[in-house]
Image (spheres, grey):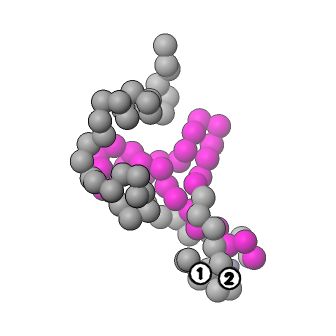
Amino acid sequence: MIRCAKCDNDTRTTTLVTAMGDVMVAGTIATDPQPISAQVCSACGYIELYAPQPFEQPEKSATQAATIEELEAMPAPGTLVA
Ligand SMILES: [Zn+2]
């Protein structure tokens, strides 16, 4: 559990979301943009932002490129799905 830097309370993991989808950061563990994760303090509202880390995504333990199936299942933001 990550603790709040301001009040030392517990934080919750969430993501930043807009009407267009997740807020992304590019050029960290992969070349493609990845969603930013946020640790939000439930007591004071303080938010810390984190770029994607491999250990936070156990379902993608490897850093290799996504499979064709995964790419087809996750269209890029702004892409219109026919
Ligand atoms: Zn706090």
Residue at 49% x, 55% y is 36
Please say if 38 is above or below 26: below
Residues rendered magenta in the picture: 15-43
Q: For numbered disc 1, what is the local secondary structure?
A: loop
Residue 78 placement (x, y as % from top left): 49, 29
| Residue 11 on the magenta segment | no
The quarter of the picture where residue 7 lies is bottom right
Whole-percent x and y of residue 37? 52, 59
Whether tag 2 and tag 1 are in contact, CB under 8 A, the answer is yes
Q: Mark 1 packing: few (<14 Cα in 10 Å), some, or many (20+)?
A: some
Question: Image quadrant of residue 20?
Answer: top right
Q: SS at mark 2?
A: loop
Residue that carries the numbered disc 1 in the rendered image: 3
Q: Which mark is residue 9?
A: 2
Residue drawn at (63%, 73%) of the image: 11
Q: Earlier in the sequence, mark 2 or mark 1?
A: 1
